[in-house]
Image (cartoon, helix red, strand yellow):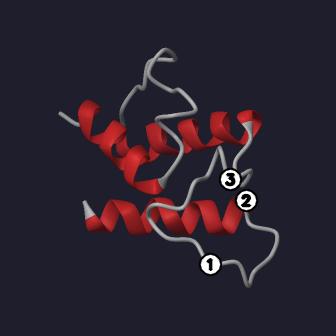
């Protein structure tokens, strides 16, 4: 799970952080913290589905489920194998 957390964290930093000095951790609020918006969440969902060869149902792709790297990885793990 640590490798997945690092991959997701790197993706979020590269795609959504405008201030390169801003520090993100696995538990930094992404949605409620304003780092990821609803449009970005869709592209993040697509990235996860392509990277891990899974399908995340729309009703599971909630702002709460995408609010931190840790929560995102928990969600992804539900759909692996």
Numbered marks: total: 3
Q: Residue at x 38, y 54 (%)?
A: 70
Give the SS element for disc 1.
loop
**Residue at the location (52% across, 40% down)?**
66
Quarter placement of the N terminus: bottom left
Decide which of 47, 40 is in the foreground and name it.
Answer: 40
Nearest to N terminus: mark 1 or mark 3: 1
Neighbours of disc 1 within 10 Å: few (<14), some (14-19), many (20+): few
SS assignment at label 3 = loop
Q: Quadrant of residue 13?
A: bottom right
Q: Which residue is mark 3?
A: 33
**How far, Cα to Cα, is label 2 from label 1?**
12 Å
Question: Which residue appears at 75% of the width and 80% of the height?
Answer: 20
Farthest residue in the left direction?
A: 81
> How dense is the environment of label 2, judged by Cα within 10 Å: few (below 14), some, or many (20 and up)?
some
Question: x, y percentage for residue 73?
Answer: 36, 48
The answer to whether residue 75 is above or below residue 28 is above
The residue labelled by disc 1 is 23
- SS of the residue at dot 2? helix
Point out residue 35 in the picture as x, y percentages from the top left corner.
71, 55
**Residue under circle 2?**
16
The answer to whether residue 12 is left or right of residue 2 is right
The relative height of residue 4 versus residue 64 in the rendered view (above or below) is below
Marks 3 and 2, how far apart at CA: 12 Å
Mark 2 or 1: the one toward you: 1
């Amino acid at each position: 799970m640590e490798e997945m957390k690092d991959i997701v964290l790197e993706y979020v930093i590269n795609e959504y952080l405008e201030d390169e000095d801003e520090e993100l951790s696995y538990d930094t609020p992404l949605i409620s913290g304003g780092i990821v918006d609803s449009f970005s969440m869709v592209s993040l969902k697509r990235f996860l589905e392509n990277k891990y060869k899974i399908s995340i149902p729309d009703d599971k792709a909630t702002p709460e489920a995408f609010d931190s790297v840790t929560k995102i990885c928990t969600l992804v793990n539900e759909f692996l194998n």
